[in-house]
Image: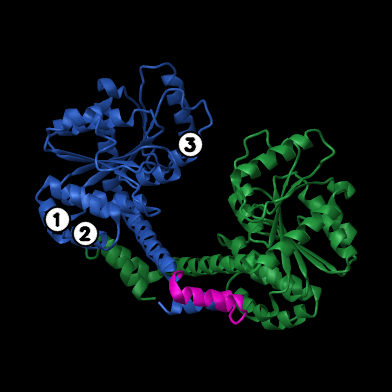
Chain colours: A green, B blue
Amino acid sequence: MSRDPAALVARAVIGDRAAIAKLISVVERGGPSAFEAAAALHPHTGRAYTVGLTGAPGAGKSSLTDALITRIRRGGTEVGVLAVDPTSPFSGGAILGDRVRMQDHATDEGVYIRSMATRGHLGGLALATPQAIRVLDAAGKPWVIVETVGVGQVEVEIAGAADTTVVVVNPGWGDGVQANKAGLMEIADLFVVNKADRDGVAETVRDLELMLDLSGHPAWRPPVLTTVATRGEGIDELWAAVGEHRAFQEGDGSLARRRRERTREELHAIVLARLEAQADAACRGDRFEAAVAQVAARELDPYTAAEELLGAR
Amino acid sequence: MSRDPAALVARAVIGDRAAIAKLISVVERGGPSAFEAAAALHPHTGRAYTVGLTGAPGAGKSSLTDALITRIRRGGTEVGVLAVDPTSPFSGGAILGDRVRMQDHATDEGVYIRSMATRGHLGGLALATPQAIRVLDAAGKPWVIVETVGVGQVEVEIAGAADTTVVVVNPGWGDGVQANKAGLMEIADLFVVNKADRDGVAETVRDLELMLDLSGHPAWRPPVLTTVATRGEGIDELWAAVGEHRAFQEGDGSLARRRRERTREELHAIVLARLEAQADAACRGDRFEAAVAQVAARELDPYTAAEELLGAR
């Protein structure tokens, strides 16, 4: 198969799974090909609705994603899933290979599951994830679930860059000091207390409601739902709540505003990444070494030297 | 007094304390005036030898600095001191105002002590400190001590950007898990076990020597010294060790290489800071909002939009 991004996009748009896989690898790697792919993809995008899923390791995000896939497929529509792990160097399905849901949905052509991981360049995943979503969007998936593994700042940012963000907790979540609790409160459109067959569900729901009382959501107050994902309990209610949040946002124009804000942030991140690449390029090679020598010899001060290096780009 | 950087430099070079103070404020603030100051300062620099002092809060860095000042002044030479606190918003002497050494050396014209703190822009102190050192260098201080308050990455980087770096620990240092132990091991040219009148000195010295055995310093092995700074014990030996390290580095050419490497890093940091400022500037105003609107309307992909924003600079 051709590795030309435009040709890949043409095949991905008609649902070619191999082309989708190659394109996601291209955007994951970054660089000029990713740039080309972005340009070719963009006209085909804008139809998918994204749902972000985040929470502490072990909260049951994968089981919940799995149950959501089953629920979405019951409605007859297709779904794409990105499992993003900023701490793993592996991608392309490796980390998901042994998961139950791969077996459940492996033969279903209407489901596309893909894991993404850090591949080299700093901040790469935060830039690559929106592009990978666009690949699935262009491939005609009306729903894209973005599940992030971990609760660091990057994970929360990635999951928070969805149309609806679901924060998954477990009974007892309110007990310990959670480093990123505030960050999670900020991005949540829906709370799910998963593993609701365990003790302490009522307390955790009450704690969350109390926190929501205190934080004062102006227009949309995140509902707090309970699920037992492994048994499929509460999944219909969760899916209905996602639908309600979508309808709310489409109704008051906040979906368009939210997407606009995301575009703004993405554009800033791309500009910054390109300039950082320029800084690295400016600080290599003979010209840079000559500037260092001039500064060391007191012929040039470092600020003027930096100007000259940048002017010579 | 004129605020023109070149005029301030002309006065600082002849030792004018008010001009020195104003110049350090200028480089601390950053911006075009700092740029001008750097250009005017540079030809007057390159004579000072810098000693970095770092270690955990409470290790006794200030007492040690104080004792070193006394020792240096006994030799008849002048000394400048920068106390850098990346976590404090105060500078200009405020945080040092109540310290003992201010009273000890306040009337000594041969000593210039100045505290520096974060003033707004990110990464500002890491850029401003080398410039503040240049101010003291240009003002004719043959020795400049840079004491950093705290043990975070920034503090270690700042203290490590000296000609000789002294890492200050206390008896018992080997016991706990210290987040930044590896970082400190990496930058140390000399270890000082201060408060050596306490229990556990021998064990701490032995632990440090063992760590040094394992890390295998190729040419210069950092000596491990003991001091009781508040009583002036071990200070002559510490000062002699600084002199030995200096002579060693001057002898084998490593001082010039080390300074060259620092210039290289400084130049890269300045280039990056200038490009980040450009990124912020590119992502503001009507042109940026127009680009966001075009991306949102699918008329333009975000990568091409970023290119256009950068091309329009």
Q: In this orientation, which residue lies closer to the viewer: B212 or A259?
A: A259
- According to the picture, the residue beneath numbered tag 1 turns out to be B8
State which region is magenta. B283-302
Q: Nearer the viewer, mark 1 or mark 3?
A: 1
Mark 1 and mark 3: span between their CA atoms? 41 Å
Mark 1 and mark 2: span between their CA atoms? 8 Å
Q: Image point 72% across, 59% down: which residue?
A: A245
Q: Amino acid at mark 3?
A: Lys
Using a 10 Å C-alpha cutoff, classify the residue at mark 2 as few (fewer than 14 neighbours), some (14 to 19) or many (20 or more): many
Q: Quadrant of residue B62?
A: top left
Q: Is residue A25 visible?
A: no
Q: Image point 26% across, 38% down: which residue?
A: B94
Secondary structure beneath disc 1?
helix
- According to the picture, the residue beneath numbered tag 2 turns out to be B37
Q: In the rendered structure, which disc, 2 or 3, sits on the residue that comes first in sequence? A: 2
Residue A2 appears left or right of B41:
right
Q: What secondary structure prevails in the magenta region?
A: helix
- According to the picture, the residue beneath numbered tag 3 turns out to be B181
Residue B173 percent across, percent down from the top left: 46, 27
Q: Quadrant of residue B284?
A: bottom left
Q: Amino acid at mark 1?
A: Leu
Q: Is residue B106 visible?
A: yes
Tag 1 and tag 2, C-beta contact below 8 Å: yes
Residue at mark 1 shares a chain with residue at mark 3: yes
Mark 2 and mark 3: span between their CA atoms? 36 Å
